[in-house]
């Protein structure tokens, strides 16, 4: 029995086990839960399954981080160092001068700081000074504590979702407590959860979880073997291509494996990509290092990680996800040249139906246990995950040019599609404005001379509210656009099928049925204008013909895309 | 072979320290847009843009690299076949200027072009819109370029779209000019032996039915 909804109290109620949590994760019910972070910590063994051991375990790991931070984050002014100016000054050339370590760490701090300030620029949570400081400290402690892994670019985007998830759960728990939703728990049980979701330990708990995830991911960050071995192989093979070189790191080894796996699963696609000289080594570094964080929007990424983190070691499933990402856009890749393919791979078009996608990856991981889902070509290929218009749609129209098609039809995608980037732009500009509006909260800025009357606190608040509302409206519109876009694609496919049938039709009856089909399609198009958000596009019916009768349509559901709106509503104030 | 080959593709690689604006430069050139919301580049990134040079359409394939990434981790052969290497630094960050030597040296070692002294490099000093914070003078950058065999130097601003277009156009022109001089930067396989080139032409000229 898999619980339908899984929340903080379920942690206490159910007998927790890997099997239960794996089922919960795969069912997708963590998406709306408020204890995703706890599940991740359980499956990664940051927390024991026995709830009564949580408090001890938590206090141990939290103290551990505090001690590490004291050891590694050197403040030469700290009283634990001798404050004798002879021994403790930036220029003193004595042993154990705290300034030496301080200066050594400066470069590292600098690199980390640059990346931290570029973390998820579209999410306000990561723009706060407190969160940035927290991320920088965690990454510095991790680098010093794991000198072989050190800090490498990309680790910050593994850490960021972890902090975010723990933060959201802590907030949700507070909220539940305030609303008296924990009444069914005993005092002891509530104390246990209080201890687990304590917001004072966000940094400590994030570090703990980050280390556990890095145990799995660090293999893809390792430095390659020393360059003399690479040079040796280079002189042996002066004409080699990227894919011919001897893999010098586990990252490259795994990317080679992925190439082979693709060849088994989808030989046509594999041949196409290899004929263009596009091996996974060329574009896959980021895919693996960030655990697909740039290929999949955050709200879907967290679901993917639910499934990934519990299937450890994660490398085999990660490889299957990698291949699934390729299969998912095979229709785009097979019709593109070198540049087109690389631009799709470097700017992956957002997946519309993440559930089927995850099912596909799990199928490749274990074909006997997990059935293969029906995969539709359902990527939003005209935009990127970041929301801007896709370079392949701007520069290289993909449709074959026929004399009948007018030029302007070739140049621009259908109207609804064309609007998406515009909306995104509006949304971004609103966001930019909202950011500048909220800037005066930082003390340094507020000391500056205020030029604009807008920055008076009261107006500011109104502004921020208004901007937030507009942001939500734009998000909703974006969702509606995406829905309609999907529907358009489906209808166009149905029309194509109809056209085929018309060509093959022999009897009058067939023609009547077909004309009814066409009428239904036309109705679908008209009803589209008034369709409520979240109405699923028509599913394929029997005989491969799309089922377009309105009565057969799935009941409206709130799509997970709405989580994006929720996130901005939960606007953290740190 | 490469002397006569009509190469409509140019592979350009951008190298430089983290945060100097490599991604911004590429995006400004390709999309004519600037955003201060770029994320750190992980591994590498890629965009293409078509340009017309002397009635010829040339596709620039621009490879943007991660500032912290050293060559070995991307794979030795990643840079092979490059037609031009763009070195970028931040004029407000002296350290990024000092790293240029090592970026250039590593490129030459790893990509090993046939004639390292004449391989086309271009130097871009980015962020000149922040004139008040400048830490590297134009003169200093120019004299560095002179010591490296007169590398062309452009002061650019990805933010203000200053000189970016001109710089990349010059890069494309330079690479094309080298091509017409029949220089071959990377030793390749010897010419294929075509048994009957005419026959192939006939096949390409269309169908006979």
Image: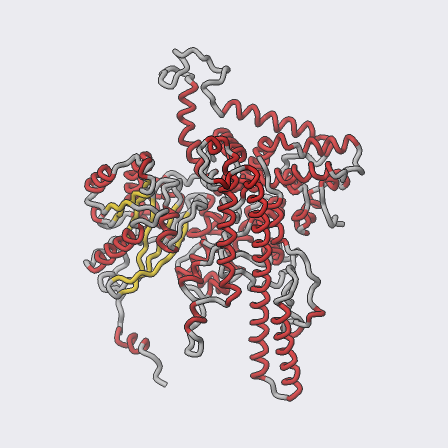
**Horizontal side, residue B126 vs residue A316: left or right:** left
Q: Report the residue at 24% width, 57% height from top.
A: B173
Residue B170 place in picture, x, y as percent: 25, 54
In this orientation, does residue A51 appear? yes
Image quadrant assignment for residue A554: bottom right
Vertical placement of B83 versus B5: above or below?
above
Front position in the image: B180 or B115: B180
Q: Quadrant of residue A41?
A: top right
Q: Which of the pair B108/A166 is nearer the observer?
A: A166
Q: In the image, A333: left or right of B142?
A: right
Q: Quadrant of the C terminus of chain B?
A: bottom left
The residue at the point 45 percent across, 70 percent down is A399
Q: Position of residue A440 (x, y in %)?
A: 50, 36
Residue in the image at 42% along x and 48% along y: B35
Task: Say if A282 sits above or below B88 in the image.
Answer: below
Q: Position of residue A241 (x, y in %)?
A: 36, 54
């Amino acid at each position: 029995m898999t619980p339908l909804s899984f929340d903080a109290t379920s942690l206490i109620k159910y007998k927790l086990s890997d099997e239960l949590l794996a089922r919960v994760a795969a069912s997708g019910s963590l998406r709306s839960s408020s204890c995703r972070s706890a599940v991740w910590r359980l499956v990664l063994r940051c927390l024991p399954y026995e709830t009564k051991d949580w408090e001890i375990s938590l206090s141990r790991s939290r103290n551990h981080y505090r001690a590490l931070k004291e050891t590694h984050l050197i403040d030469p002014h700290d009283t634990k160092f001798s404050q004798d100016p002879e021994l403790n000054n930036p220029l003193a050339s004595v042993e154990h001068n705290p300034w030496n370590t301080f200066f050594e760490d400066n470069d590292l701090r600098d690199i980390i700081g640059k990346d931290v300030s570029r973390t998820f620029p579209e999410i306000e949570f990561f723009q706060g000074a407190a969160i940035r400081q927290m991320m920088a400290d965690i990454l510095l402690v991790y680098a010093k504590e794991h000198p072989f892994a050190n800090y490498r670019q990309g680790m910050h985007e593994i850490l960021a979702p972890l902090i975010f998830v723990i933060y959201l759960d802590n907030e949700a728990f507070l909220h539940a407590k305030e609303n008296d939703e924990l009444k069914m728990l005993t005092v002891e049980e509530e104390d246990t959860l209080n201890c687990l979701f304590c917001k004072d330990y966000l940094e400590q708990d994030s570090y703990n979880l980050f280390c556990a995830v890095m145990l799995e991911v660090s293999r893809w960050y390792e430095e390659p073997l020393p360059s003399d071995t690479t040079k040796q192989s280079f002189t042996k093979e002066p004409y080699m291509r990227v894919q011919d070189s001897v893999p010098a790191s586990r990252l490259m080894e795994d990317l080679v494996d992925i190439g082979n796996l693709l060849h088994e699963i989808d030989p046509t696609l594999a041949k196409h990509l290899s004929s263009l000289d596009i091996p996974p080594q060329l574009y896959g570094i980021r895919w693996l290092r960030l655990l697909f964080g740039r290929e999949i929007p955050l709200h879907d990424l967290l679901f993917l990680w639910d499934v990934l983190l519990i299937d450890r070691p994660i490398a085999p499933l990660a490889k299957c996800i990698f291949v699934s990402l390729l299969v998912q856009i095979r229709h785009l890749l097979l019709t593109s040249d070198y540049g087109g393919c690389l631009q799709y791979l470097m700017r992956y078009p957002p997946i519309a139906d993440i559930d089927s996608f995850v099912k596909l990856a799990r199928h490749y991981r274990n074909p006997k246990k997990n059935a293969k889902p029906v995969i539709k070509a359902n990527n939003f290929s005209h935009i990127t995950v970041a929301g801007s218009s896709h370079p392949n749609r701007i520069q290289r129209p993909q449709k074959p040019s026929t004399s009948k098609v007018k030029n302007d039809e070739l140049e621009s995608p259908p109207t609804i599609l064309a609007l998406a980037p515009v909306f995104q732009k509006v949304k971004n500009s609103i966001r930019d404005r909202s950011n500048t509006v909220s800037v005066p909260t930082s003390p340094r800025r507020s000391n500056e001379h205020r030029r604009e009357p807008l920055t008076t606190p009261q107006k500011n608040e109104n502004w921020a509210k208004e901007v937030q509302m507009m942001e939500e409206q734009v998000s909703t519109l974006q969702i509606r656009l995406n829905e309609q876009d999907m529907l358009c694609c489906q209808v166009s496919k149905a029309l194509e099928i109809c056209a085929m049938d018309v060509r093959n039709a022999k009897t009058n009856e067939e023609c009547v049925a077909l004309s009814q089909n066409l009428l239904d399609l036309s109705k679908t198009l008209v009803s589209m204008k008034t369709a409520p958000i979240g109405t699923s596009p028509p599913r394929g019916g029997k005989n491969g013909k799309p089922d377009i009768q309105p009565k057969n349509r799935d009941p409206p559901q709130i799509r997970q895309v709405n989580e994006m709106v929720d996130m901005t509503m939960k606007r953290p104030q740190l | 072979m490469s002397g006569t080959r009509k190469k409509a593709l140019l592979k350009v690689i951008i190298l430089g320290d983290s945060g100097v604006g490599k991604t911004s430069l590429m995006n400004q050139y390709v999309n004519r847009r600037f955003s201060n919301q770029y994320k750190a580049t992980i591994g590498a990134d890629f965009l293409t843009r078509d340009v017309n040079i002397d009635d010829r359409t040339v596709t620039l394939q621009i490879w943007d690299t991660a500032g912290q990434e050293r060559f070995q981790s991307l794979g030795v052969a990643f840079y092979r076949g490059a037609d031009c290497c763009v070195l970028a630094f931040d004029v407000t960050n002296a350290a990024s200027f000092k790293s240029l030597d090592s970026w250039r040296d590593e490129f030459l070692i790893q990509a090993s072009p046939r004639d390292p002294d004449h391989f086309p490099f271009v130097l871009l000093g980015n962020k000149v819109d922040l004139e008040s914070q400048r830490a590297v003078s134009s003169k200093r950058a120019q004299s560095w370029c002179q010591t490296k065999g007169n590398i062309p130097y452009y002061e650019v601003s990805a933010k203000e779209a200053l000189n970016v277009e001109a710089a990349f156009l010059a890069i494309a022109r330079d690479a094309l000019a080298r091509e017409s001089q029949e220089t071959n930067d990377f030793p390749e396989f010897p010419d294929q032996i075509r048994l009957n080139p005419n026959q192939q032409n006939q096949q390409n000229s269309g169908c006979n039915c």
